[in-house]
């Protein structure tokens, strides 16, 4: 096995996650300028932020089918193009409407990346390193967020005046272009190629990437069995009884991911710290600390996910969620709008624990888990469903946090999130299966999907050896 080819291909594919993180966070540095230049009310600015989320929702639900038809690699290349267009377009925006349109385009790229990048990495990776490689996407998302913060800081130090905000958005064109060109050296997913009857091309790639079985022909046979099984006819609808287990698992992990309040906390971290008594500059510094905590614990989870297991990470993360959210709730109930320095430190410590728990648990597991639990033929649909659910809930939670916090108080909001994480803990304990170290074709058998697969796969023509 050529580990260099595998590692390089996974890292390049995961750059979609880095651009996702950058695109999400970069707007935080341009809020004042956008409000001033486009004369935005609070409602208009909220929609400006939401425009990317709307694009993300549409991109996530739309990417699965094209990736099944045209291949994972081609859709990743299209994603890179969308990122580039969004970066240049927002930097050169001539009106609020044009800015909204290009932010929407960036959202489409983010949504597609959350579907196709994890799917592609899962399909090129042997089981023993699959979790670690797919989790690189989550690491890159976190790293991209930090890159956006630092990029904004550097551009601010350059004192570029009224065009400063344009540089903040435009700088994303550089990594987008790099992503585009690097992708051409990546191989196509061998599982997708076999589904297209391009077996010889898949064999060449598997020889480079390595296999679960240790023997390429045996690996191809296993994949063929999965694809051509009578239980996975190409005419099968995705939403049917045989797929109910993976569908429910994907939907529930995505729902719980956002019911923790993680996106609300990331989007409004400075606001939360100001509510907890911090000055504006101190609040920004504390937000950086939160981002650094996220990065450190994402790296830790990345290192151990294939040894520790997906389910154990989720259990540890659930306990951390519960403790941190209720600690934050108690702090806000205790001090309200009259925080002491001690109360502010408790909120900072609680949110650091919260972010560490998220990075170590849900953040590291969600995209790995969803990419593993669906059969080959419907994996694109499954990843799209999980991603759509995640982003729909992200939009709902993020948009409702400010009015609910204002109406009921932050303590109540954190309490609700805490109870949701108690429900997640029970879901992990009683419903979530472990998938670490199990070949993709075996996971569907574990979920009862392949229990009656025929002993031998029908032959698939190997004559079509065209290249991508």
Image (spheres, grey):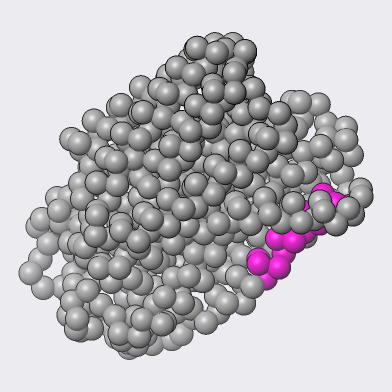
Q: Quadrant of residue 154?
A: bottom right
153 vs 410, left or right, is right
- Is residue 197 in view from this perspective? no
Question: As rendered, which of 465 and 348 lies closer to the eye?
Answer: 348
Residue 214, compared with residue 139, is above or below; it is: below
Per the image, is 288 magenta?
no
Q: Quadrant of residue 194?
A: bottom left
**Relative vertical location of residue 221 with respect to residue 408 in this rendering, above or below:** below
Residue 387 visible in the shown view:
yes
Q: Is residue 162 above or below residue 206?
A: above
Picture residue at 64% right of the left edge, 22% below the top: 277
- The reply, left or right, for residue 83 in relation to residue 91 is left
The percent coordinates of residue 294 (x first, y second) are 49, 47
Q: What residue is drawn where x is 88% and y is 53%?
A: 159
Residue located 54% across and 28% down the image: 345
Image: 306 above or below 206: above
Q: Whole-percent x and y of residue 448? A: 14, 50
Would you say residue 176 sits in the magenta stretch? Answer: yes
Give, as a single range, the part of the protein colored magenta: 163-177
**In front here: 321 or 289?**
289
Q: Where's the N terminus, which quadrant?
A: bottom left
| Whole-percent x, y for residue 244 in the image | 25, 42
User: Does the magenta stretch mainly form a helix, a strand or a loop?
Assistant: helix
Q: How many marks?
A: 0
Q: Going by the image, does 301 lie left or right of 349? A: left
Of residues 461 and 365, the one nearer the viewer is 365
Q: Position of residue 373 (x, y in %)?
A: 27, 53
Q: Residue at x 20, y 36 (%)?
A: 429
């Amino acid at each position: 096995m050529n580990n260099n080819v595998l590692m390089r291909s996974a890292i390049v594919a995961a750059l979609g996650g880095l651009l996702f993180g950058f695109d999400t966070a970069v707007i935080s540095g341009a809020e004042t300028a956008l409000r001033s230049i486009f004369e935005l009310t609070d409602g208009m600015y909220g929609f400006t932020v939401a425009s990317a989320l709307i694009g993300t929702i549409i991109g996530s639900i739309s990417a699965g089918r094209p990736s099944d038809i045209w291949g994972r690699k081609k859709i990743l290349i299209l994603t890179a193009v969308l990122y580039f267009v969004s970066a240049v377009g927002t930097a050169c925006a001539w009106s609020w409407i044009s800015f909204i349109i290009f932010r929407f385009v960036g959202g489409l790229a983010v949504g597609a990346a959350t579907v196709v990048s994890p799917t592609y990495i899962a399909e090129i990776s042997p089981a023993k390193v699959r979790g670690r490689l797919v989790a690189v996407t989550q690491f890159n998302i976190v790293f991209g967020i930090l890159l956006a913060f630092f990029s904004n800081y550097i551009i601010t130090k350059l004192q570029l005046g009224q065009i400063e905000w344009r540089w903040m958005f435009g700088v994303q064109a550089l990594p987008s272009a790099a992503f585009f060109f690097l992708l051409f050296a990546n191989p196509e997913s061998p599982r997708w190629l076999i589904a297209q009857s391009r077996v010889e091309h898949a064999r060449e790639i598997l020889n480079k990437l390595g296999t679960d079985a240790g023997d390429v022909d045996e690996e191809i046979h296993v994949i063929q069995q999965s694809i051509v099984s009578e239980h996975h006819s190409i005419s099968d609808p995705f939403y049917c009884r045989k797929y109910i287990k993976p569908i429910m698992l994907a939907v529930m992990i995505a729902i719980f991911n956002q019911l923790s309040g993680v996106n609300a906390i990331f989007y409004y971290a400075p606001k939360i710290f100001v509510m907890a008594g911090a000055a504006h500059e101190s609040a920004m510094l504390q937000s950086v600390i939160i981002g650094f905590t996220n990065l450190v614990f994402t790296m830790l989870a990345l290192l151990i996910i294939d040894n520790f297991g997906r389910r154990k990470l989720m259990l540890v993360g659930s306990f951390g969620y519960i403790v941190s959210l209720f600690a934050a709730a108690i702090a806000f109930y205790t001090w309200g709008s009259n925080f002491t320095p001690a109360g502010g430190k408790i909120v900072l410590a609680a949110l650091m624990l919260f972010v560490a728990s998220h990075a170590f648990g849900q953040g590291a597991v969600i995209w790995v888990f969803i990419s593993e639990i669906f059969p080959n033929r419907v994996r694109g649909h499954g990843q799209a469903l999980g991603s759509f659910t995640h982003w729909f809930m992200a939009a709902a939670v993020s948009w409702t946090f400010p009015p609910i916090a204002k109406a009921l108080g932050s303590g109540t909001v954190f309490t609700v999130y805490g109870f949701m994480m108690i429900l997640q803990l029970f879901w992990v304990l009683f419903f979530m299966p472990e998938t670490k170290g199990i070949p993709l074709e075996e996971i569907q058998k574990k979920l009862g999907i392949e229990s009656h697969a025929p002993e031998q796969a029908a032959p698939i023509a190997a004559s079509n050896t065209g290249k991508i």
